[in-house]
Image (tube, grey):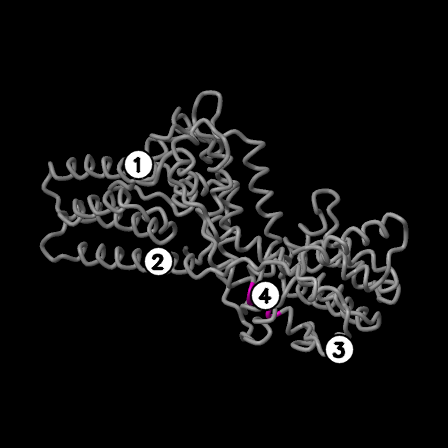
Amino acid sequence: MPQTPIFSSMLGSSCSGQVQPDMGERCVDPVYQDGNLVSGSLEALIERLVPTMDYYPDRTYIFTFLLSSRVFIHPHELLAKVGQICIKQKQQLETGTEAEKLKSFAAKIIQLLKEWTETFPYDFQDEKSMKELKEIAHRITQCDEENGTVKKIISQMTQNLLMALSARSQYQEIREKFRQPVTDKGTILKTKPQSTQKDILSVCCDPLILAQQLTYIELERVSNIYPEDLMQIVSHMDSLDNHKCRGDVTKTYNLEAYDNWFNCLSMLVATEICRIVKKKQRTRMVEFFIDVARECFNIGNFNSMMAIISGMNLSPVARLKKTWSKVKTAKFDVLEHHMDPSSNFCNYRTALQGAAQRSQTANSNREKIVIPVFNLFIKDIYFLHKIHTNRLPNGQINFKKFWEISRQIHDFLTWKQVECPFEKDKKIQSYLLTAPIYSEEALFIASFESEGPENHMEKDSWKTLRTTLLNRA
């Protein structure tokens, strides 16, 4: 994925993709408004993707179309159509005797394939796509058989593609197994003092350092999320065209793994708080996580911040009134203000926009960090998909919808490319990723043992939970 922003002028005429000469505003298919491409048939949009002697689509169009095309057509089918158009153009050029024009055309086709394989390597995971790619490459190499330059470039492109596919395959094979919550009665029931039990403070007592290590983990995980993974949010939805692509879509584990990380962090925060026997130490733990969340906010790591706040807002933690009465909650109130869900998380979106603007003008990787709340990011894409149809009443693809979806996805991809400026601390990360976490019922049991039930409802819940756990095989 290119580093240079390609959506900087999204609302300007540049988002139309360079319009071929003689295809101005009056063209019926595709349709333009104020210089912007808003709709078109699939065939017309594919034609705009393929370069000619006098035309090459801008990167914004290439990214948006390749990203959205999978909703309507398999990648290998799209490659086949691109190959057919290439053959026709090659044949037209061959009727003349201008070899240089043929080489120029070949160079543009190679550039398109290069951008495609680099940005969406997983489109070439199956044999059909690789076959189509090889066939196009074979025909293009015939345009420059004398010095073999084209052949060398294609060979390098193919090698890079295979390496990218191999790396992704290896990541899926070694992805961490989801941590299972602790439910063992001996671990949860506090029958003995826990003064020697290891907790997060014994591993890291500096909120800033822990926030930095959380950010390291976030960036590491988000680096394995690809644009086609995010587009599955749309392509998996029911649509007129979905029957064409649903069967071959590979289940993505990257989104699940990242979502699982958020849940594990929330449960870890709650576990660390609830399992502490002494109120003073428990209060210190709550204040520590508040400081960590605050540092995450300052860094631009909104996902970890939200996970920590979510953990402290879980019922087993929230009910610890004696503990919270000793906590200096002013900082926590500020954090909750930023994450206030009213007006569609308006406060958070303002903070995110500020972080994004800082990132654009930053001189250091530290200032470039933007990690959005992932489940809100996903919901935004889902919302865009649900409120806008894939096709207009005239049957044309609603390309204006996909401009906006691809813009948001591209922003995310830009943020994920930031190189983490913090040094990895294996000890801290090992604890964050492997420390035992309690199940929801185990959290309630630990919470009741820390601060006893206060009403009949809590007493009944406590009795039922304890009996269930003790009787469990």
- In front: label 3 or label 1: 3
Overall secondary structure of the magenta section = helix
Q: Please identify the quarter of the rendering in which residue 65 is found.
A: top left
- Read off the residue under disc 2: 164
Q: Alpha carbon of mark 3 to alpha carbon of mark 1: how far?
A: 63 Å
Image coordinates for residue 68, horizontal then vertical, percent? 43, 39
Q: Residue at x 75, y 64 (%)?
A: 189
What amino acid does circle 2 point to? Ala
- Read off the residue under disc 3: 195
Whether 215 is among the magenta residues is yes
Name the residue nearer the viewer: 440 or 87.
Answer: 440
Image coordinates for residue 269, horizontal then vertical, percent? 69, 63
Name the residue nearer the viewer: 10 or 436.
Answer: 436
Image coordinates for residue 171, horizontal then vertical, percent? 42, 60
Q: Alpha carbon of mark 4 to alpha carbon of mark 1: how far?
A: 40 Å
- SS at badge 2: helix
- SS at badge 4: helix
Read off the magenta span: 212-217
Are dots 2 and 1 in contact, CB under 8 Å?
Answer: no
